[in-house]
Amino acid sequence: MKIVPILRVMDMKESVFFYTSILDFELKYPDEGIDPWVTDLINGEAEIQLTSVEGNQKSGFAINVQVKQIDNLFQRYLQRGLDTSKKLESPVHQGPLDQSWGTREFYVNDPNGNTLRFQELTGTDIEA
């Protein structure tokens, strides 16, 4: 079974740019380009679907993304322009933190209020 989350976005081009230029995603169907209503993105085996919303509908989904080498990944995102200044009060948005539940994680909010929680499993008896 594979689950593909659908994230609601207000501006498809801005969102596709964010996910492809900073977070390593690419268009699943590059020959079709960016659809203004629905766009599928992939990163390895991970897949998300962006769908446009109109008006004042709020987005705000959260997705757990399990990764390896989380510190290197965060630095790469910063070098690509990840802006952490909008969440200065949130240490987990400023860089990877060790959590008491056995993960090291950082959060990224996309331009539409969706949150990606990048996690690396740190427990000695847990496989990533």
Image (tube, helix red, strand yellow):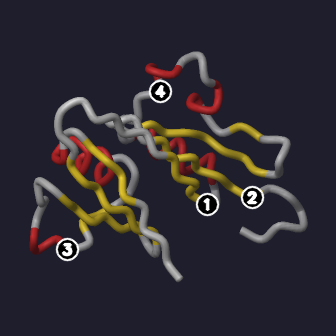
Element on which disc 2 rests: strand
Q: Give the Cα distance between marks 4 and 2.
A: 23 Å
Up-down relation of residue 99 to residue 38 (above or below): above
Q: Amino acid at mark 1?
A: Gln
Mark 4, other Cα within 10 Å: few <14 / some 14–19 / many ≥20 = some
Res. 60 image quadrant: top left
Q: Give how far apart the Cα atoms at labels 1 and 2 are.
A: 8 Å
**Which three-letter amino acid code belongs to the residue tagged 4?**
Thr
- The residue that disc 2 covers is 121
Q: Secondary structure at mark 3?
A: loop
Left-right relation of 10 to 6: left
Instruction: Point out which mark residue 66 bears.
Output: 1
Quadrant holding the C terminus: bottom right
Label 2: few (<14), some (14–19) or many (≥20) C-alpha neighbours in 10 Å: many
* Marked residue nearer the N-terminal end (1 or 2): 1
| Label 1 with label 2: CB-CB less than 8 Å | yes
Instruction: Give the CA separation, mark 4 to mark 1.
Output: 20 Å
SS category of the residue bearing label 4: loop
The residue positioned 45% from the left and 20% from the top of the image is 85
Expressed as whole percent of the image width and height from the top left, the position of residue 16 reads 24, 51
**Residue at which label 3 appears:** 29
The residue where tag 4 is placed is: 84
Mark 1 and mark 3 in contact (Cβ < 8 Å)? Answer: no
Q: Are marks 4 and 1 in contact (CB under 8 Å)?
A: no
- Amino acid type, label 3: Tyr
